Image (spheres, rainbow, N blue to C red):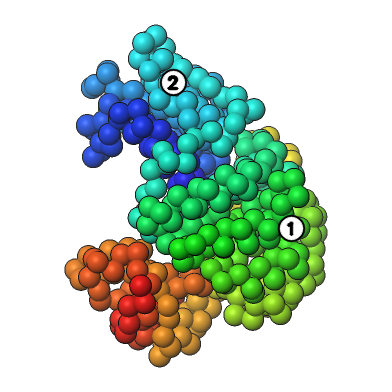
Amino acid sequence: MNVNDSEKVAGVLRARGHEPAPDAESADFVFINTCAVREKAAQKLDHSLDRLGWLKRRRPELRVGVGGCVAQLDGRAILERAGHVDVLVGTHNLRRVPDLLDQAIEEGAPAVDLDRKADAFAVPAGDIAHGSPVRAYVTAMEGCNHVCSFCVVPRTRGPEVSRPPEQIVAEVESLVRRGYPEVMLLGQTVNAYRHRDVGFADLLARVDAVPGLSRLRFTTSHPEHVDRSLGSALRDLERLCPYLHLPFQSGSDRVLQSMRRGHTRARYLEIIDGLREAVPDLALSSDVIVGYPGETQGEFEDTLAVLETVRFDSLFAFAYSPRPGTAAALAPDDVPAAEKQRRLQVVLDYQQRRQREQHAARVGLTEEVLVDTIDGGGRVSGRTPHFRIVHFDGEEGLLGQLVRVKVTGAGPNALSGQLTQAIH
């Protein structure tokens, strides 16, 4: 989602006559798009601004912009700690970056727009500078109505707002005409999508029906909004890939309640069972937080038990870090940093073993791969419908093509194979 926001900023700047620079040292304007979900990401902003401050002292004409979730969360405090910032823009105002840049140059003072009530969908679809020629991101909704105790997203993105389905379908149709074989629908809680009488499964069906589209994906989902209609969509829609990212965060009911996740461990596992009943080969990924305030060793082991039960295809694991303004930040951060890192490493090691085993079981099988990357040296790579990466020998002309690849090797993070057939 942050990548897509950066594509929007690049696109509106290009539409106003700006061109990409090869690096910050030669640029007239450097824009930093930020994420506030984890403390480490927020810290990267300050490090980047320190570097740009040094660069701006050498080149006073350089303009610096900051946008995204940290900008929305910290607001003008960013200007106080980094006086060389010229443009400060919130999560809903990306279309205004060129205007704010012009204003900063004309007035010689920082230009700021942090209005969270602005139309987050106002960036023209045709202006978005998609970074991949194969997979295009399409915003379906913005914001989140959940109140998870560890998460700043409701503060930075605001409440859920769903985009009219007609706009989404029209954007997908335009992307297909421009040669994009795959689209991914985006939202902080994308499966909570509802616009009047159109629910998320209805939206998926409308997009799936777009002529010429090869593959459809979506992210990120919340367990509360998984129902039979989503399972049916994953089972029945021809272009919808059998892959779902569904965060569970913890295997402990006490921790889940403290996190305000709105589901229990048993309920999450029930949802997974229902999805796998509908789609037996469904690929699942998830998010997990270790070291949440008060998490005991036994509760951490409850999380490991969920990993063993579900056997996720991939996993995003994080050590808890308190975020400003969240309910969890008021609780003592009482799990020592070293213990958080130990637990995190246990989870990562487990998942690596799991993925290695899973991938090894696919050696000898033939996979349908959408080529999305030129690796160089006569090698290309792409994704299977289940979002597995496959590397193989191939020419650059295969980019964007669906091909069949026989799997000949496997590692924990990717497969390798041999091209057997080009589909289209």
Report the side of 192 relative to 89 (left or right): right
Q: Earlier in the sequence, mark 1 or mark 2?
A: 2
Residue 231 seen in the figure: yes
Residue at 48% from the left image edge and 53% from the top image edge: 173
Residue contact at pointers 1 and 2, CB within 8 angstroms: no
Within-10-Å neighbours for mark 2: few <14, some 14–19, many 20+:
many
Residue at 60% from the left image edge and 24% from the top image edge: 115
> Which residue is under mark 1?
225
Residue at 62% from the left image edge and 37% from the top image edge: 157
Q: Residue 104 appears at what percent x and percent y?
A: 40, 15
Within-10-Å neighbours for mark 1: few <14, some 14–19, many 20+:
some
In the foreground, 278 or 101? 278
- Gap in angstroms between the C-alphas marked 1 and 2: 38 Å
Say what amino acid the circle numbered 2 marks: Leu
Report the side of 111 relative to 280 (left or right): left
Quadrant that contains the C terminus = bottom left
Say what amino acid the circle numbered 1 marks: His
> Which residue is under mark 2?
100
Which element is circle 2 on?
A: helix
Residue 308 seen in the figure: no
Residue at 24% from the left image edge and 21% from the top image edge: 59
Q: Residue 383 appears at what percent x and percent y?
A: 42, 69
Q: Which residue reaches farthest left?
A: 377
Image: 135 above or below 102: below
Q: Residue 132 appears at what percent x and percent y?
A: 37, 54
Which element is circle 1 on?
A: helix
